[in-house]
Amino acid sequence: MASKYDGLARIIIQNVGGKDNVASVEHCMTRLRFELKDESKANTEMLKNTDGIVNVISSGGQYQVIIGNHVGQVYQALVEKGRFEKQADDEETGKQGKKGLLNAFVGTISGIFVPVIGLLCACGMIKGVLVLLSTFGVLSATDGTYIILSAIGDCIFYFFPVFIGYTAAKKFKVNEFIGLAIGTSMIYPTLISLMSGDAINVLFSGTALESNVYLTFLKIPVILNNYTSTVIPVILAVWFASKVERFSKKVVPNVIKSFGVPLLTLVIAVPITFMVIGPVATWISGLIGMLVSTLYQLSPIVFGAFVGGFWQVFVMFGIHQGLIPIVINNLATMKYDTIFAATATASFTQVAILLAIMIRTKNKRLKTTSFSAFFSSLFGITEPAIYGVTLPLKTPFIISCITSAVGGGLAMFLGVKFYNMGGQGIFAFPTYVNPNGNALHDILMVVIAMAVAMVLAFILMLIFFKDKAEASTATAGVDLNPTNAELASPLGSTQTPSSDSPIVLGSPIAGRIVPLSEVKDEAFSQGYMGNGIAIEPTEGKIVAPADGILTSLYPTGHAMGITTDSGLELLIHVGKDTVKLKGKYFKVHVKQGDAIKKGQLLGEFEIDSIINAGYSTLTPFIVTNNNDYEQFAVTDQALVGTGDIIITLNKY
């Protein structure tokens, strides 16, 4: 079935080096997470300049393409077009040995947990709401409604080894059903029931590792643990099983491989899991919980300030995914967590800052972008705010980190704890419902911490905000007349503009000027790609707006990126979805990497043919690094010819 994101999916596939360069791809709340065989084959600049993509970063061994709230739809189109269901083995990718320990760890954890995060949050919210309903007497634990909803809420947590067994198997490239079998065996009811009886022996008596023995396997003592809700044991067990399966494939005859490989793998992996991997992993889990608890006890305020203050930085680089198993482990071992509790205010400081910007700015495009990101941040999705507003403006991002640190430290001072996985932003409140005490205490405390952090962020933003001129109305005091002596010389001439001299750009296309806000693509209309203007062409020619380098050129000829001699980064994008024409009706006269001169013919396109094919030719002309300039003015002329000055900028 065709999707409106098919074109974007094709662009992404082509610019990550083609589908053969993709070892694996997953997605989280806002971004596509690729593992590429050779990252040097990816065209990062082209992706960054593609409408529909907020940003591209490489972190944690992953190549991350940030999409926004509709990442799920883009992912579905991507999987369909690239047929990524079957992925290469680690040996084929050649990546595992090159990532480094931290990157390999984050990449592995992301691959295992990202697929279940949505379900995990949904079930956690149900659990939190049930506690509130029980506290207020709306439902009792014996009501049928309560029991059924409780079954939904508890399903993933009780059977967590089963879910993780499946996703870990996919990540470690082992038969998924073997992963499921290992997970189910670890929570087999008969084995769990044995722990309620008398122990037949005690191992490591008198030490921190003292453990009861309830049964033996081939006369070898087995230390039983309750593995429901646990994380680390099943991950290590499936990793071990992946090694056993590869060995099994080599030694089992082809005639019985279909059942012989799973048989040999399970007969070896499951007993080893119960005798060695499970107990060791349980001890490791306990130590991790003790370490987090110890750091918290040393100084709750410092702990909260550090985690809260750096959380948005963690999110930017995607390394926050590496903390998820620690949080889940804390919930399993301690029944609460302080890491996520310390991040409670992070998205809300962004909300306060965006609100302050909307109040202070006269820039309609910045106001529109902030408004859209405001609502995303309310729901805990902060990437549009970070990449679209606060990070490019620098000061707002610094303020958000500082106030999030204050909020995190205050939350820990007030004793806030996190009791269930759940939603983000305003949907996170059920996660602070204490099921074993005062249900509302932590919610009240976290609201206090949020309020303090938000008020502080709002006030600081009002004080330190420096507005940016509106592109369509900031022409006052700026002479856009081409005969003006200051502006008449070409940008790439031998005369280098001083820091006080305005920089001018000629129109790359002849046509009718259209405000960028009228482009029917929010990546452009809401300023995600940068500031600029749109042109409805009257002539199918593209000329260089300034001297510089053609840094990117899409193969179909409909989009190109230019870096001018003065450092401006420009994007010219002819039409919407014209990539689907696959170069038809476009002719390119230059190649990527060429030095170009202002007014030079770069390409041509057939306006009537493109329109008759059902596509718009409205062309956004964007300065993607416009945040380096305090004044951004566009011409008030309705019609322009190629080379006419249409944009003027002044540096800070």
Image: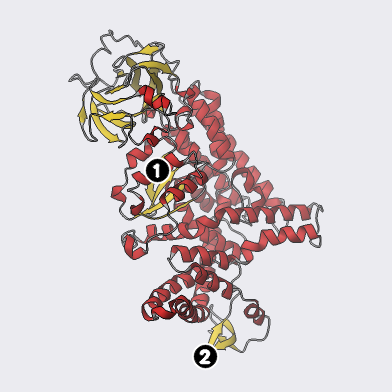
State the residue position of label 1.
10
Residue neighbourhood size for the residue with mark 2, other residues' Cα within 10 Å, grouped as few (<14), some (14–19), many (≥20): few
Residue neighbourhood size for the residue with mark 1, other residues' Cα within 10 Å, grouped as few (<14), some (14–19), many (≥20): some
Picture coordinates of residue 567, whole percent (x, y): 28, 29
State the residue position of label 2.
218
Quadrant (top left, top right, bottom left, bottom right) of the C terminus: top left
Determine which quarter of the picture holds residue 505.
Answer: top left
Mark 1 vs mark 2, CA separation in Å: 56 Å
Q: In this view, does 377 lie to the left or right of 189?
A: left
Compared with 597, 265 (above or below) is below
Picture coordinates of residue 203, whole percent (x, y): 54, 85
Determine which quarter of the picture holds residue 447.
Answer: top right
Labelled disc at residue 198: none
What amino acid is at disc 1? Arg
Compared with 264, 242 (above or below) is above
What amino acid is at disc 2? Leu
Q: Which residue occupies the extreme left position in the image?
A: 494
Specify whether residue 536 is in view.
yes
Secondary structure under badge 2? loop
